[in-house]
Image (spheres, grey):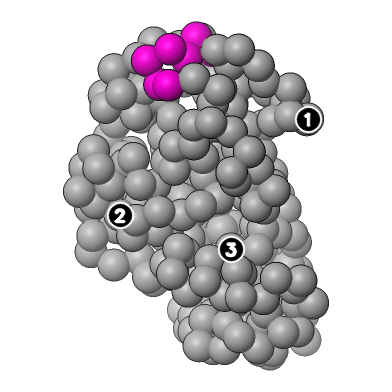
């Protein structure tokens, strides 16, 4: 069968059930599936190098044409554990924040929280690889994804950005959504939805086949920290977030 769509999906552990479901479905035969870090997912969709991406929601305004095609997302209803601001000092003492080069949404979320919730004015620096282990003094670092598993508990102060957003807005947060830059065939979308639903329902199997070392930790993470439903609360949160970031430039 001819592959109809090129699709970029985040390669982090948080997409494991989704990738597992797709791998078990015939819909995989209809796509060129590419695994990328969030920032690359975003850029590929912006550059029209893929048709569909599980992309950081912060880049939606940059797309000339966009469609949110799925009821599934990468979100959190409370703490997420893998999107954090790590610091050696309290928030009010932070002078510089290094921004994760793999991120788009979390970078913008940090800026929103600094201005509207924490009321601080640090200097923001776009970081390079390895920055998370080089901060000192009044530096802080935004880190996303699987690298957080090794960093959690290593800094005197850790601020979970999904939890901080929840405290600020009383809403869950959406980090990534399935977005296309053109109209997508409804039959394909239906098959993709079915595949992801299967994967979410078989998260334990995904972990087992994924050769995960700490299965208990990852199961807790995928079932209690990550929430995949793009429900009304998350849609409301997404609209608010996109409104708040209009003032920021990349």
Residue numbers of the magenta segment: 90-96
Rendered image quadrant of residue 128: top right
Q: Nearer the viewer, residue 196 or 129?
A: 129
Figure quadrant of the N terminus: bottom right
Q: Residue at x 43, y 69 (%)?
A: 224
Q: CA distance from mark 3 to mark 1?
A: 22 Å
Residue under label 3: 14
Q: Nearer the viewer, residue 156 or 96?
A: 156
Question: Contact (CB < 8 A) between labels 2 and 3?
Answer: no
Q: CA distance from mark 2 to mark 3?
A: 16 Å
x then y, percent, for residue 79: 40, 53
Question: Contact (CB < 8 A) between labels 3 and 1?
Answer: no
x then y, percent, for residue 42: 60, 44
* Image-based side of 123 in relation to 117, left or right: right
Rendered image quadrant of residue 100: top right
| As drawn, 129 above or below 188 | above
Q: Nearer the viewer, mark 3 or mark 1?
A: 1
Residue under label 1: 130
* Image-based side of 148 in relation to 60, left or right: right
Which numbered dot is residue 172?
2
């Amino acid at each position: 069968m001819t592959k109809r769509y090129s699709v970029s999906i985040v390669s982090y552990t948080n997409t494991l059930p989704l990738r597992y479901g797709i791998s078990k479905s015939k819909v995989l035969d209809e796509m060129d599936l590419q695994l990328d870090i969030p920032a690359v997912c975003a850029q590929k969709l912006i550059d029209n190098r893929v048709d569909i991406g599980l992309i950081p929601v912060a880049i939606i305004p940059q797309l000339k044409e966009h469609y949110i095609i799925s009821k599934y997302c990468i979100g959190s209803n409370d703490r997420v554990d893998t999107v954090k601001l790590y610091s050696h000092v309290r928030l009010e003492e932070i002078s510089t924040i290094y921004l994760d080069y793999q991120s788009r949404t979390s970078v913008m979320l940090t800026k929103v929280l600094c201005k509207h919730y924490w009321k601080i004015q640090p200097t923001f620096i776009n970081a390079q690889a390895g920055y998370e282990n080089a901060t000192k003094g009044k530096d802080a670092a935004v880190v996303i994804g699987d690298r957080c598993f090794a960093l959690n508990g290593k800094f005197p102060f850790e601020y979970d950005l999904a939890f901080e957003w929840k405290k600020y807005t009383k809403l869950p947060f959406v980090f990534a959504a399935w977005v296309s830059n053109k109209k997508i065939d409804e039959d394909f979308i239906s098959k993709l939805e079915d595949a992801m639903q299967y994967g979410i329902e078989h998260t334990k199997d995904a972990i087992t086949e994924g050769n995960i070392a700490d299965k208990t930790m990852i199961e807790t993470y995928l079932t209690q920290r990550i929430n995949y439903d793009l429900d009304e609360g998350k849609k409301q949160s997404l609209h608010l977030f996109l409104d708040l970031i209009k003032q920021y430039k990349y």
